[in-house]
Image (cartoon, coloured by chain):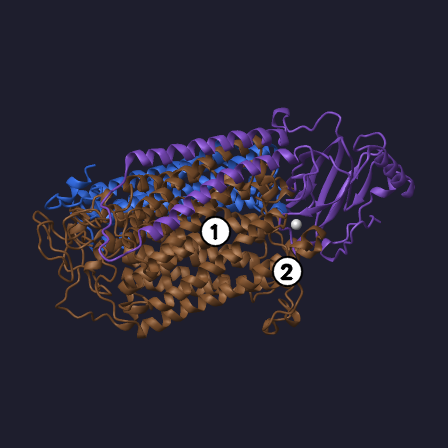
Chain colours: A blue, B purple, C brown
C-alpha cells in the first residue's frame, strides 16, 4: 500500500478543491437538489398521467399553447440577456451589466405576469387544481392539479429569481461588481439558466405532449 | 409463529428457518469474535497494538462470502415468493379457486360470497361482515379492495398479508390445510379503530362449507337482501365479532 | 467576499483565529445568532437532545399503554381530556403518540444529532478550515430547524391533536380529516417537515462545499477521517433525497388543504404514489441516519484500539456503495403494498446486496480491534456496543428483505425490533460515543467517566431487554401501532412479554436521565479538558478545548492519514495529522499545526 509512502510525504501541496470558488460550487450543489425536486414532481406527473390518460385533454385544447410559446420565447431571451450581463462585467463594462440585468428583469417579470394572466383566464374556464370544482371542457382534475403544481413551483422560482436579479441590479448600480469580482452575477446566471431549462422541459411535457 | 394453516405456509416458514440458521451462525460468529477480541486485546501494561492497515486477502474473503450467502437467500426466497404471488400466472389464483371479494373499510371487513353458482356479481351473492368462511383443500381467490384508507389483510396462521388499497383491487389467494377458526387482523394503521379491526376466518370441511352457505342464504330470506351493508360512519361503528350485517 | 476568494483556491482566504485579538463578539452573536460552526454544533446538540427527551417521553406513554392496557397512567391526569381522560390514554391520542415518537426521533433527534451536531462540530476542524464555506447559511440552517421542531410540537395542542397517521403518513388516512380525526395536526406535520427540509438542504450545501473546497494542504481525500467521509456522503444523500420528501409533502399538503387528489383515489389519484415518493426519500434517509454513526464509531474504535482502522479504502468504498445502493431499494418497504410482485423480486435482490458493504464494515471494525490495545473509555464502550447492536439490526434486516418472510413479519413488532436495533442500538449508541468523545473538545470539560459508565451499563442492559423480545412479539404476530393487542385472542398470551418490555422500557427511559445529568453537571463542574484527552490524531486535537473562533491560527498542514496509531518506533502510540514528520515535538503547538514549505500563507 502506498500509505507508508504517504506518511513520509513532506511539505503537503496546497489543496485546490475542484478549482471552483465556493459560492459557485454551492450554487451548483443547490441546483442539484432543485433537479431532484422537479424530478419528483415530473415523476409524479408521469405516473398519474399514465394511470389516468383520460384526464388529459389534447394539447392546446384547454391550455393556450400559443401564448405560452411566446412566454417561453421570452424566458429564453432572458437567458440570453443574462449571458450578456455576465459577459459585460467580465470585461468590466458597468453600463452593459446594468442594461442587460435590467432587460433580464423585465423579461422575467413579464413571464410571471403573462403566467398569472393565463392562470386567471384558465380559472375562469373552470380549469382549477381543486378536484371538486374542476369544470374545464376536457381533461380531468388531475390535469389541473398537476398543471398548477408544476408551473406554480416553476413560477415561484422565476419570481424569486426576479427578486434576486433586482437585488443584483441594486448592487450593480452601487458599483459592487468589477472585472475581477463578479461571482454574484455569475451564480445569479447559473440559477437563471437552470430555471429557464426547467421551463423548457415543463413546457414540453405539460403543454406539448 | 403459529403453526401454518395454508399450503404455502410451510414453504415460507422453511425460508425463515434457513435465514435464521444463516444469520444465527453469523451472529454467533461475529459477537463471539467481538467479545473474545475485547477480552483478549484489552489494555494491559506494556501491550502494544499491532500496526496494520488491513489485509487485502481477508477483506476479499469477507466480501465474497456474504455476497454468495445473500445470493443464495435471494434465490431460495424468490422461488417461494413467486409461488405465493403466482407471478408466473400474472397473479391469478388457481382456476378452480373459490372467488370471494373482501372490501375493507374503517373498521370492518366485508366479505362477498359468490353463492351457489360460484360466481361473483350475480344475484345469489351474499355479504357477511367480519366473517370469512372458506372450505378446506380448495384454493380461495380474494379480490381485495378498500373503501376508504389503506388497510392490511393479515391472516397470521396462513402467512398471508396484503395491503388493501382504495382504488385498487389486489388478488390474494390461499388454500387452507386445517379446519378451525383463525384470526383475521388489520396490519396497517388505518385510524383510531385500527386496533380493533378484527374478524374471524373459519375453515370448514368442504361439505360443511356448502351447508353453512345454504343456511346463510336461507336465514337472510332473499339471496340479495343480505348484501346490504350498513354504511354507518366507521368511527361510531360498534363492531362485535361475528355480528351479521343488518 | 474578496478578489482572492474568487480567483485563488478557496483555502487561502479564511479568517483564522487571531490570539492577539480577544474575541469581542457580543453575547448574542457569540451564543445565539452565531455563525461559528462550533457554536452551531453545540446548539444542534441542545436542540436535538431536547427533542430526544420529547420523543422518549412519548415512547414511555406508548409503552405504558402496551404494558398495562387501559390502566390510568401515573401522572397521566395532567393530560387534557382530549388525550387521556383520567390518565387513560385514548386510541386517537395513542396514534398521535406513535406518529410523533417516530417523527421526533427521526427528524428532530437522530438526524440533527448526527448531521447537525457532528457535521458542524467536525467538518471544518477535520478538514482544517476556519469555518464552514457559508457561515451565515449555516446559522440559518439551525434557526430554521428550531421553528420546524416547535411547529411539530405545537401540533399537540391544536384542535384535533397531532398527526396520527404514522411517521410514514400514508394517504388517504393522512390526507382526509374524516378518516383520521386529525386535520390541523396533519397539515402542521407537512409544514414542519418542509421547513426542516430547507434546514437540511442548507446544511448539505455547506457540508459538500466545505469538504470539496476547503480541505487544508495535505488533506487528500484518502486522508480524511471517516466521520468526514460519512458526512460527505450523507450530505449528498440529503441533498438529493430531501427535495423528494418536500415535493411529496407539498402535494400531500395540497390534498389536505386545497382539495387536489394526488394521493386520493376518488379522482384517479394514487395512494401508492405517496409510498413510492416517500420511500424513495425514506430509504436514503435510513442511511442518513446510520452512515454518520458508522463514521463516528470508526473514529472512536480506532482511537480506543490504538490501531489504524482496518482497511480504510474498503471502509470508504463501503460507505459509497451503501449510499449508491440505497437509491434502488425503496420498494422493500412495499412488498405487501400491492406493487407488482416481480418488482418485489428485484427490490429483494438490490436490498440483499446492501448486506455486503454492511458486512465489510462490521468485519473491518472487528479487524480494527483485533490485536489492538483496547482502552475502555466511555466513548469506546458505546462504540463497541454500536458494533454489537448494528450486527443484530443488520441481520434481522435480512429477514424482512426476503419477500416471503416479509409477508409474515411486515407491519409487526419484528420490524419495530429491527428498526430500533439500527436506530437506537446503532445510531444512538454511536451518538453517545461521539458526544462522550467530543464534548470535552467543544465545552472544555470532560464528561464524568463514572456517570458515563453507569449510563452505558444501564442503557446497554435495558436496551436489549426492551428490544430483543420485540422480535418474539413480532413472530407471535403482534401488529405495529395497535393500541390494545388484547383485542385479539391470539395476542393475549403475549401480554406478559409486553409488560416485561414496558417495565424495562421505563427503566431504559429513566437511565437516560443519568446522561442528561452528566451533561448538565459537567458543563459547569466537569474536569477541565486538556487539548487531546483521548490521545487522538485528527486536526482538532492540537487545538485548545474549546478551539478559538477561527479554529487555527494559520492554515494547518496535513502530513498523514488520521489513524496512524501505534506507529512502530515512535514513543507515543498516536501521531497527529498536523505534526511534521521530522518535527521533534510530539504535541503540536497550541493553536495550529506548523505549516510546511510551499504552503500558501
Ligand atoms: Cu387497520
Ligand atoms: Cu428501506
Residue A113's x, y, as percent?
43, 47
As helix, strand or loop, the secondary structure at mark 1 comes to helix
Q: Is mark 2 within 8 Å of ligand 1?
A: no
Q: Quadrant of residue C536?
A: bottom left
Give the residue displayed 71% in from the left and 26% down from the top: B94
* C316 over C206 or under it: above or below: above
Is disc 1 surrounded by few (<14), some (14 to 19) or many (20+) residues within 10 Å?
many
Between C13 and C570, the one nearer to me in the picture: C570
Q: CA distance from mark 2 to mark 1?
A: 27 Å
Between A172 and C477, the one nearer to me in the picture: C477
Callout 1: chain? C
As helix, strand or loop, the secondary structure at mark 2 comes to helix
- In the picture, measured across the screen, residue C145 lies left or right of residue C370, that is right
- In the picture, measured across the screen, residue A188 lies left or right of residue A114, that is left
* Dot placed on the residue nearer the N-terminal end, 2 or 1: 2
Instruction: Tell me if label 2 and label 1 are in contact, CB under 8 Å.
Output: no
Residue B41's x, y, as percent?
31, 51
Q: How many marks?
A: 2
Residue A9's x, y, as percent?
12, 43
Give the residue displayed 38% in from the left and 36% down from the top: A73
Between C68 and C230, the one nearer to me in the picture: C68
Question: Residue C92, labelled with which disc?
Answer: 2
Question: Residue C421, labelled with which disc?
Answer: 1
Q: Quadrant of residue A55?
A: top right
Callout 2: chain? C
Is disc 2 surrounded by few (<14), some (14 to 19) or many (20+) residues within 10 Å?
many
Residue C169 seen in the figure: no
Residue C451's x, y, as percent?
38, 68
* B138 over A13 or under it: above or below: above
| Nearest to viewer (mark 2 / mark 1) | 1
- In the picture, measured across the screen, residue C217 lies left or right of residue B38, that is left
Amino acid at each position: 500500500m502506498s500509505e507508508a509512502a504517504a506518511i513520509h510525504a513532506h511539505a503537503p501541496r496546497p489543496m485546490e478543491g475542484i478549482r471552483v470558488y465556493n459560492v459557485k460550487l454551492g450554487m451548483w450543489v443547490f441546483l442539484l437538489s432543485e433537479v431532484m425536486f422537479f424530478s419528483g414532481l415530473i415523476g409524479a406527473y408521469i405516473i398519474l398521467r399514465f394511470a389516468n390518460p383520460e384526464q388529459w385533454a389534447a394539447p392546446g385544447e384547454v391550455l393556450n399553447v400559443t401564448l405560452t410559446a411566446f412566454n417561453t420565447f421570452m424566458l429564453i431571451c432572458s437567458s440570453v440577456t443574462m449571458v450578456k450581463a455576465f459577459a459585460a462585467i467580465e470585461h468590466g463594462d458597468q453600463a452593459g451589466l446594468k442594461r442587460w440585468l435590467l432587460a433580464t428583469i423585465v423579461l422575467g417579470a413579464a413571464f410571471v405576469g403573462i403566467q398569472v394572466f393565463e392562470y386567471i383566464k384558465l380559472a375562469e374556464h373552470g380549469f382549477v387544481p381543486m378536484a371538486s370544482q374542476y369544470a374545464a371542457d376536457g381533461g380531468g382534475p388531475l390535469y389541473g392539479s398537476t398543471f398548477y403544481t408544476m408551473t406554480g413551483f416553476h413560477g415561484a422560482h422565476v419570481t424569486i429569481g426576479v427578486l434576486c436579479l433586482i437585488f443584483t441590479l441594486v448592487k450593480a448600480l452601487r458599483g459592487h461588481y468589477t472585472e475581477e469580482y463578479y461571482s454574484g452575477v455569475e451564480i445569479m446566471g447559473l440559477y437563471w439558466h437552470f430555471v429557464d431549462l426547467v421551463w423548457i422541459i415543463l413546457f414540453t411535457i405539460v403543454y406539448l405532449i | 409463529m403459529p403453526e401454518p394453516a395454508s399450503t404455502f405456509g410451510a414453504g415460507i416458514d422453511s425460508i425463515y428457518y434457513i435465514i435464521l440458521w444463516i444469520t444465527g451462525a453469523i451472529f454467533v460468529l461475529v459477537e463471539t469474535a467481538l467479545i473474545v477480541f475485547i477480552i483478549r486485546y484489552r489494555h494491559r501494561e506494556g501491550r502494544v497494538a499491532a500496526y496494520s492497515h488491513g489485509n487485502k486477502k481477508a477483506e476479499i474473503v469477507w466480501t465474497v462470502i456474504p455476497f454468495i450467502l445473500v445470493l443464495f437467500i435471494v434465490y431460495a426466497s424468490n422461488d417461494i415468493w413467486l409461488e405465493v404471488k403466482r407471478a408466473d400466472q400474472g397473479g391469478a389464483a388457481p382456476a378452480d379457486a373459490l372467488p370471494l371479494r373482501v372490501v375493507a373499510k374503517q373498521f370492518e371487513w366485508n366479505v362477498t360470497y359468490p353463492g351457489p353458482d360460484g360466481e361473483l356479481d350475480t344475484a345469489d351473492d351474499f355479504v357477511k361482515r367480519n366473517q370469512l368462511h372458506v372450505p378446506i383443500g380448495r384454493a380461495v381467490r380474494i379480490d381485495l379492495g378498500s373503501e376508504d384508507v389503506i388497510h392490511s389483510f393479515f391472516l397470521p396462521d396462513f402467512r398471508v398479508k396484503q395491503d388493501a388499497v382504495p382504488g385498487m383491487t389486489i388478488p390474494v389467494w390461499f388454500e387452507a390445510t386445517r379446519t378451525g377458526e383463525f384470526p383475521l387482523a388489520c396490519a396497517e394503521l388505518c385510524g383510531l379503530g385500527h386496533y380493533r379491526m378484527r374478524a374471524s376466518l373459519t375453515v370448514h370441511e368442504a361439505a360443511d362449507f356448502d351447508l353453512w352457505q345454504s343456511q346463510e342464504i336461507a336465514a337472510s330470506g332473499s339471496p340479495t337482501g343480505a348484501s346490504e351493508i350498513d354504511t354507518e360512519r366507521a368511527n361510531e361503528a360498534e363492531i362485535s365479532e361475528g355480528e351479521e350485517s343488518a | 467576499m474578496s478578489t482572492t476568494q474568487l480567483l485563488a483556491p478557496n483555502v487561502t482566504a479564511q479568517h483564522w483565529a487571531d490570539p492577539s485579538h480577544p474575541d469581542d463578539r457580543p453575547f448574542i452573536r457569540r451564543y445565539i445568532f452565531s455563525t461559528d460552526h462550533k457554536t452551531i454544533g453545540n446548539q444542534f446538540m441542545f436542540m436535538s437532545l431536547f427533542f430526544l427527551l420529547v420523543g422518549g417521553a412519548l415512547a414511555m406513554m406508548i409503552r405504558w399503554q402496551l404494558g398495562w392496557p387501559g390502566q390510568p397512567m401515573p401522572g397521566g391526569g395532567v393530560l387534557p381530556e382530549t388525550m387521556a381522560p383520567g390518565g387513560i390514554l385514548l386510541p386517537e391520542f395513542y396514534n398521535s403518540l406513535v406518529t410523533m415518537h417516530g417523527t421526533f426521533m427521526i427528524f428532530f433527534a437522530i438526524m440533527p444529532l448526527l448531521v447537525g451536531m457532528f457535521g458542524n462540530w467536525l467538518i471544518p476542524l477535520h478538514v482544517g478550515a476556519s469555518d464552514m464555506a457559508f457561515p451565515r447559511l449555516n446559522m440559518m440552517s439551525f434557526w430554521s430547524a428550531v421553528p420546524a421542531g416547535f411547529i411539530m410540537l405545537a401540533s399537540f395542542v391544536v384542535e384535533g391533536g397531532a398527526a396520527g397517521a404514522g411517521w410514514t403518513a400514508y394517504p388517504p388516512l393522512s390526507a382526509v380529516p374524516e378518516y383520521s380525526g386529525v386535520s390541523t395536526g396533519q397539515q402542521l406535520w407537512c409544514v414542519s417537515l418542509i421547513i426542516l427540509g430547507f434546514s437540511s438542504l442548507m446544511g448539505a450545501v455547506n457540508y459538500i462545499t466545505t469538504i470539496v473546497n476547503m480541505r487544508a494542504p495535505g488533506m487528500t481525500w484518502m486522508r480524511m477521517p471517516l466521520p468526514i467521509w460519512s458526512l460527505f456522503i450523507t450530505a449528498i444523500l440529503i441533498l438529493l433525497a430531501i427535495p423528494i420528501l418536500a415535493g411529496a409533502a407539498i402535494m400531500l399538503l395540497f390534498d389536505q388543504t386545497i382539495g387536489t387528489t394526488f394521493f386520493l383515489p376518488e379522482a384517479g389519484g394514487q395512494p401508492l404514489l405517496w409510498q413510492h415518493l416517500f420511500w424513495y426519500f425514506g430509504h436514503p434517509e435510513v442511511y442518513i441516519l446510520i452512515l454518520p454513526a458508522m463514521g463516528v464509531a470508526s473514529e472512536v474504535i480506532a482511537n480506543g484500539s490504538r490501531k489504524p482502522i482496518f482497511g480504510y479504502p474498503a471502509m470508504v468504498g463501503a460507505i459509497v456503495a451503501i449510499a449508491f445502493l440505497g437509491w434502488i431499494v425503496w420498494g422493500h418497504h412495499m412488498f405487501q403494498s400491492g406493487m407488482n410482485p416481480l418488482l418485489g423480486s428485484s427490490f429483494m435482490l438490490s436490498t440483499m446486496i446492501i448486506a455486503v458493504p454492511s458486512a465489510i464494515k462490521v468485519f473491518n471494525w472487528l479487524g480494527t480491534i483485533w490485536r489492538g490495545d483496547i482502552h475502555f473509555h466511555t466513548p469506546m464502550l458505546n462504540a463497541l456496543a454500536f458494533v454489537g447492536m448494528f450486527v443484530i439490526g443488520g441481520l434481522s434486516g435480512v429477514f424482512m428483505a426476503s419477500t416471503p418472510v416479509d409477508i409474515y413479519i411486515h407491519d409487526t413488532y419484528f420490524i419495530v425490533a429491527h428498526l430500533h436495533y439500527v436506530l437506537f442500538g446503532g445510531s444512538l449508541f454511536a451518538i453517545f460515543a461521539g458526544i462522550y468523545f467530543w464534548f470535552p473538545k467543544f465545552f472544555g470539560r470532560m464528561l464524568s467517566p463514572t456517570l458515563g459508565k453507569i449510563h452505558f451499563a444501564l442503557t446497554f442492559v435495558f436496551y436489549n431487554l426492551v428490544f430483543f423480545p420485540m422480535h418474539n412479539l413480532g413472530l407471535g404476530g403482534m401488529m405495529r401501532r395497535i393500541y390494545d393487542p388484547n383485542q385479539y385472542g391470539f395476542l393475549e398470551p403475549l401480554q406478559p412479554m409486553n409488560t416485561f418490555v414496558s417495565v424495562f422500557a421505563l427503566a431504559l427511559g429513566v437511565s437516560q436521565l443519568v446522561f442528561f445529568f452528566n451533561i448538565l453537571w459537567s458543563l459547569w463542574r466537569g474536569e477541565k479538558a486538556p487539548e487531546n484527552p483521548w490521545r487522538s490524531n485528527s486536526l482538532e486535537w492540537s487545538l485548545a478545548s474549546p478551539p478559538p473562533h477561527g479554529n487555527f491560527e494559520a492554515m494547518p498542514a496535513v502530513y498523514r492519514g488520521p489513524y496512524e496509531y501505534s506507529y512502530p518506533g515512535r514513543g507515543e502510540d498516536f501521531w497527529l495529522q498536523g505534526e511534521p514528520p521530522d518535527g521533534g515535538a510530539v504535541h503540536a503547538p497550541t493553536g495550529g499545526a506548523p505549516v510546511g514549505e510551499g504552503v500558501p500563507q
